[in-house]
Amino acid sequence: MFKRVNPWLWVLVAVLLSRLISMALFPLVDTTEPRYAEIARLMATTGDWITPWFSPGIPFWGKPPLSFWAQAAAIKAFGTSEFALRLPSWLCTLAMLWLTGCYARAVYGRQVERWSALILATMALTYISAGAVMTDPFLALGTTLSLVSFGMVVAGHQRYWRWLFFAGLAIGLLAKGPLALILTGTPITLWLLWPSWRGNWKQTLGAFPWVSGTLATLAISLPWYIAAELKTPGFLDYFIIGEHIKRFIDPGWAGDLYGSAHLRPKGMIWAFWLWASFPWGILAIGGVTYRLLRRNASAATLVPWRDPQGGLMLLAALTPMLFFSLASNILWTYVLPSMPFSAILIARGLCALHDSRPQLARRASIPLVLSVPLLTTAFALVMVAGNHKLKTEEALTKDYAMLKAPGDSALLYLDELPFSAQFYSNGTAAGVSMSELTKMREKQRYSRYFVAIPKDQKDDILAQLPASTVIEASNLRYLLVSIGNTAQTAVKNSTQPQKG
């Protein structure tokens, strides 16, 4: 039985399992993962499935809820853990791999199908996002489903694909909003405008149930938008106008309620694609450059726009970069919707190389397939072994839990509360200012006060704390100190603390 399984499938399974294992071992590192993880945890604990909450009392208007629904459901099923929260992204990646393989097989055959799946699974961004608490895999799943469905209908496979096109739009709208319509509609529109690609465009468009499909898309996605606005008025203005217009035309958008702008040079998205597609993007660019410099006639067979399906794939691969080229407030994860179609195009070129120079293709492909999984897994193991070197409060919250006794304070952070501390403390950690801490001590609210102080301010802060202060633990960013509640509550400004 096992002999009938092709080696490429074993390699693909090993790659996916390596990510499944590493994502269970690696803690949530500030800022993105624990921020979204805490939103999902609050959704699971409060039972509020309409409004994602940034923190108790503060709604999160930055993203629709699909990823939080999936992560909160995973918490309900498997408990609160890194594995549970990351599992939905891993399943999204599996679905994208299947869709990519189906499309590649229908258009170019089984060899391109296999390499498309392997290349996509081992691209840097795909591999990392497969085990991360993020919203991007859900958007990429939606756009991939819609664009693959369109391509399958063009290839003559109508059946359920003509309906799945609209399912993809609904997933995208509930994952990241109208951006899904842009990333899906742009390549299709440009493809239809190209006379040599579109063929009988009326027949192609006529294969889709536009009226019933659009109504189904709205029936799935629109009720949540209405419910979210009714429950927390102002959501639609912030999300539609702020997140989809102001964020891109204003690099330093001051209206961002949940973070800071990610200022990048315009056009940086293309460098992000090279980074995200590593190592395969470098191979593709090198191969195309080599062919062009040699002016090899056979290079014409590798040009994707020579056939309609290749043109559609090329447009689908380029659209995320084209759309974000003039934006400065961007992240490298924005190119994830490009990866499935980039993988097919690269696989097509690699298969052509294999046909002409099989030994070279085999020698090059093995290290390329293994590079990202091995490097990422090795990095995860090394960093887990030295947990104190990570930007996570997992260990410090555990230290606090072991030290805490009845009558002690919650874990207090001066001055800003990291998202990972909020998550790993199950929402009990709090951020306080020095004046608030002083008032607590003056009122003798607790027997002991456990305070995490920033290491880069430790000398100034420790000078303001009493001599009884004990350093209990530390990590990359903070010292955990305990302060006993003595009869003398005045803060001493010059005495250094005793070190424990």
Image: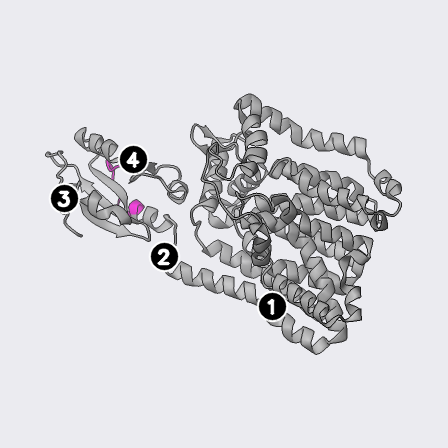
Choose the circle earlier in sequence order: 1 or 3.
Answer: 1
- Dot 3 lies on which element? loop
Viewer-nearest residue: 460 or 215: 460
Q: Amino acid at mark 3?
A: Ser
Task: Give the SS element for disc 2.
Answer: helix
Q: CA distance from mark 3 to mark 4?
A: 20 Å
Residue neighbourhood size for the residue with mark 4, other residues' Cα within 10 Å, grouped as few (<14), some (14–19), many (≥20):
some
Q: Position of residue 65 (x, y in %)?
A: 57, 35
Residue 301 is inside the magenta segment: no
Please name whichever residue, 85 or 106, is drawn nearer the observer in this view of the structure.
106
> Which of marks 2 and 3 precedes in the sequence?
2
Do the numbered discs 2 and 4 sit on residues whose CB atoms are within 8 Å?
Answer: no
Q: Which residue is mark 4?
A: 432
Residue depicted at x 80% and y 34%: 210
Disc 3 marks which residue? 468
At horizontal 77% and vertical 67% (from top left) the residue drawn is 299
User: Looking at this view, is 290 or 161 the one in front?
Assistant: 290
Please name the residue shown 52% across and 31% down the image.
61
- In terms of secondary structure, where does tag 4 sit? loop
- Range of residues picked out in magenta: 400-410
Q: Tell me the quadrant of the picture where the N terminus can be found.
A: bottom right
Amino acid carrying label 2: it is Lys
Residue 136 picture quarter: top right
Amino acid at dot 4? Val
Please state which of the two labelled residues, at mark 1 or mark 3, is closer to the viewer.
Answer: 1
- Between discs 2 and 4, the one toward the N terminus: 2
Mark earlier in primary sequence (1, 4) = 1
Q: CA distance from mark 2 to mark 1?
A: 29 Å
Residue holding disc 1: 368
User: 44 and 498: which one is in front?
Assistant: 498
Residue 64 visible at all: no
